[in-house]
Image (tube, rainbow, N blue to C red):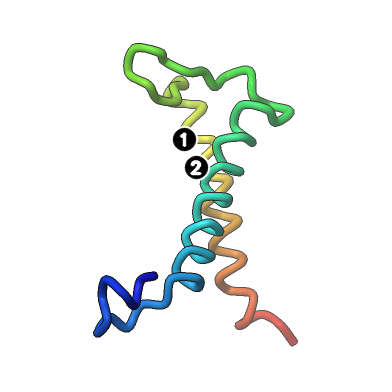
Amino acid sequence: MLEKFLPHAVLKAKPNLESRIRILERDWATVYDMFSGKDNSSFGWDEHRQMVVAEDAVWNSYISVRIIFYFLLSCFDQTYI
């Protein structure tokens, strides 16, 4: 169907949709873990602003753990023997 509307486009619908679905699943998993994880008591939902809320200390702790994890994961290829 994409080729019908954009005949000269390089995009392939199925791979692009699959990629987008993977990104949405990853993002949803992050939010789900915030609310349903074992340490979820500090996170909340603000109905008025329609966003996740928490105290600054909670956010800083959450982010620092994720940054360390992603840093270690990104260095895995260099440390693998």
Gap in angstroms between the C-alphas marked 2 and 1 = 5 Å
Contact between marks 2 and 1 (CB within 8 A): the answer is yes
- Would you say 19 lies left or right of 77 here? left
- Which residue is pictured at 57% across the width and 19% down the height? 42
- At mark 2, the secondary structure is helix
Q: Amino acid at mark 1?
A: Asn
Q: Would you call the spot at circle 2 few (<14 residues within 10 Å), some (14-19), or many (20 or more)?
A: few
Q: Amino acid at mark 2?
A: Ile
Q: Measuring from the top left, give residue 15's x and y in whole percent.
A: 50, 73
- Which residue is pictured at 48% across the width and 18% down the height? 45
Q: Measuring from the top left, give residue 18's x and y in whole percent.
A: 53, 65
- Which residue is pictured at 47% across the width and 59% down the height? 20
Q: Measuring from the top left, give residue 47's x and y in whole percent.
A: 40, 13
- Would you say 76 lies left or right of 56 here? right
- Would you say 7 lies left or right of 61 here? left
Residue 71 picture quarter: bottom right
Which residue is labeled 1 in the image?
Answer: 60
Q: Measuring from the top left, give residue 49's x and y in whole percent.
A: 32, 18
Q: Is residue 4 above or below residue 37?
A: below
Q: Is residue 47 above or below residue 68?
A: above
- Would you say 55 lies left or right of 76 here? left
Which residue is labeled 2 in the image?
Answer: 63
Residue 50 picture quarter: top left
**Which quadrant of the rendered structure holds the N terminus?**
bottom left
Residue 11 picture quarter: bottom left
